[in-house]
Amino acid sequence: MLLEDKVALITGAGRGIGRALALAFAREGAAVAVNDINAASAEAVAREITEAGGRALAAPGSVADRAVVEPMIERTCEAFGRLDILINNAGIVRDRMVFNMEEEEWDAVIATHLRGAFLCTRFASRRMRQQGTGRIINVTSRSGLLGNVGQANYSAAKAGLVGFTLTVAQELNKYGITVNALAPRAETDMTATIPASVRARRDASWAGSSVRRRGTPEEVAPLALFLASDRAAHVNGQIISIGGDKLALWSPPREVAEAFVFGGWSLQNMLELFDSSVGFQLQSLAKKD
Ligand SMILES: NC(=O)c1ccc[n+]([C@@H]2O[C@H](COP(=O)([O-])OP(=O)(O)OC[C@H]3O[C@@H](n4cnc5c(N)ncnc54)[C@H](O)[C@@H]3O)[C@@H](O)[C@H]2O)c1
């Protein structure tokens, strides 16, 4: 088994992608701490694993709450003796156009994804650092990489997770810990909240593209399992998407055009030269598969 003797904490694992990962990780031999803000669903998934002969514990509570996260990681280490894998998967959406978005909707999304991933990583990485090994997977989204109408809060949080991944990957590399961002695509309760008209437009836009279907939560597991395993020690600071039939590696943002005025850019230079220099290569906002 790929993850024999490993211990994984998976957040938001009461349903959807997190649940599919928890079951797959347990099947590959990992002991799994099943976190979810919904205690009943965390307990149900932990029970499902133990009834199938695996090792699991329920770790209910919000990842955005330090009073939950710190003891949750201590309990996981006490119960299973170590912590090898953290998957920052817990997530919510509160979609609304930016001009209608309430501060609470902004704050809730940022807190769940960003503060949650930060807190879990902070406490987990202390343990992994002592062990000299670890795997952290931050679940991001195409919304954070490309933008998506109605998701200013969510795309800001998911883009934030990419920046977080790039930095923490550099910080923890010397301790034998890898940190990668995984952008999944799967039909779940979360995507079921997408209005039918938006889904229809999306499906139509896939015609002729390399994407044929969104895929299932179970189909996200092979990439997460690989990244979490000893086989992926060389994969660090990467952004990788998986959904349905397609696996893709993304580049982090890069300079695509440059122009120099020696001595610095004046406003006059900018007005005269912008369009004829970097302005030649303005980037499309269109989504690309
Ligand atoms: N489904 C997709 O196509 C897709 C695409 C891109 C990114 N994602 C990301 O994948 C992850 C899983 O999404 P999903 O589609 O399975 O959604 P989901 O809504 O089915 O599952 C999310 C889980 O997170 C839990 N959760 C929410 N807030 C929490 C908190 N504060 N603390 C702990 N648990 C919390 C929920 O109770 C739920 O069980 C999310 O981070 C989501 O943003 C999903």
Image (cartoon, helix red, strand yellow):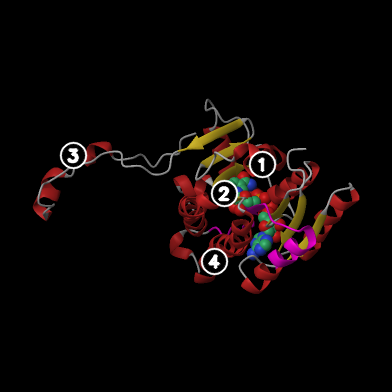
User: Residue 176, which numbered label?
Assistant: 2
Front one among 109 and 167: 167
Q: Which residues are magenta?
A: 72-95
Mark-to-mark CA distance, 4 and 2: 37 Å
Q: Amino acid at mark 2?
A: Gly
Number of numbered tags placed on the structure image: 4
Q: Sequence-wise, which precedes: disc 4 or disc 1?
A: 4
Q: Indicate the quadrant containing the N terminus: top left, top right, bottom left or bottom right.
A: top right
Q: Does the magenta-highlighted stretch encompass residue 86?
A: yes
The kind of residue tagged 1 is Ser
Q: Residue under circle 1?
A: 229
Q: Earlier in the sequence, mark 4 or mark 2?
A: 4
* Ligand 1 falls in quadrant: bottom right
Query: Could you give the CA–CA distance between mark 3 and mark 4, rounded to whole angstroms?
Result: 40 Å
Q: CA distance from mark 4 to mark 1?
A: 36 Å
3 or 1: mark nearer the eye: 1
